[in-house]
Image (cartoon, helix red, strand yellow):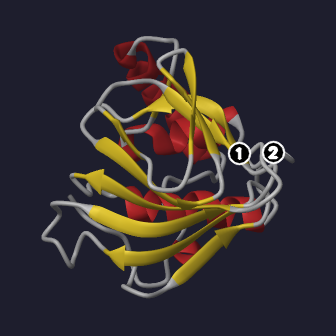
Amino acid sequence: MARKGAYIANQLTGESITWLETAADTQGRRLVFDFTVTPGGNLPATHFHPRQSETFVMTSGRFHVLLDGKEQVIGPGDRLVIAPGVPHRWWNAGQEPARMTVTFEPALNTETFLEQFYGLGNAGHTRPDGVPSLPQIMAMARRYELFVAGPPVPVQKLLSLVIGGVARLFGLKAFYPEYSPDGEVRV
């Protein structure tokens, strides 16, 4: 569970977060954080959030977003709202850090997912680009309601049930206490 003012970073993807409003602070209505992505930093997987909107408000730098198949570049003062269910990915192709405020509405358990994702990357339990293995993703997918673009959600849920179940038999988890020392958000 995130705490207001706490800082986390993912060394592999070039991301860092300072929590401004957590799920606990807002009774689950939203999650707000300062977000910085270093030059070359990116999230390599096109994904979507079925029940959440995601809003970027840029403060400095430039940020590339592939939104429903169309590339957009946003800069200081720009605001981009990604509606629930819209596939997207992002990256910083510039020479300076991209800084923004990000809001997820509702919060759900996104802060716990980010702690887990960053923790796995920093501990060396991902590919070099920071993406966890398919079994690890499947062990986590249903719990955090984050899906990749492409296969229909029912197929991904079925795969997460089957592959995630097998992954858990081999010790992979949806939640690692060492990456979220204050516990996890329950929704």
Q: Is residue 101 above or below residue 166?
A: below
Q: Quadrant of the C terminus?
A: bottom left
Among the 4 quarters of the image, the one containing residue 13: bottom right
* Amino acid of disc 1: Asn
The residue that mark 1 highlights is: 42
Residue furthest to the right: 128
- Give the residue displayed 71% in from the left and 43% down from the top: 131
Q: Position of residue 164 (x, y in %)?
A: 52, 36
* Image quadrant containing the N terminus: bottom left
One can see residue 95 in this view? yes
Query: Looking at the picture, how far across and down is residue 45, in whole percent?
Result: 63, 32
Closer-to-camera residue (151/58): 58
Residue 96 in the figure: left or right of residue 78: right
* Contact, mark 1 vs mark 2 (Cβ under 8 Å): yes
When the figure is inspected, residue 73 is found, relative to residue 144, above or below; the finding is above
Measure how far apart labels 1 and 2 are at the Cα level. 9 Å
Q: Callout 1: 10 Å neighbours few (<14), some, many (20+)? A: many
- Badge 2 crowding class, 10 Å Cα cut-off, few under 14, some 14 to 19, many 20 or more, is some
Residue toward you, 65 or 17: 65
Residue at point 30%, 73% (across, down):
22
Q: Amino acid at mark 2?
A: Asp
* Residue at the farthest front position: 77
In this view, 89 is above or below 1? above
Say which residue label 2 marks: 129
- In the drawing, does residue 66 fall left or right of residue 101? right
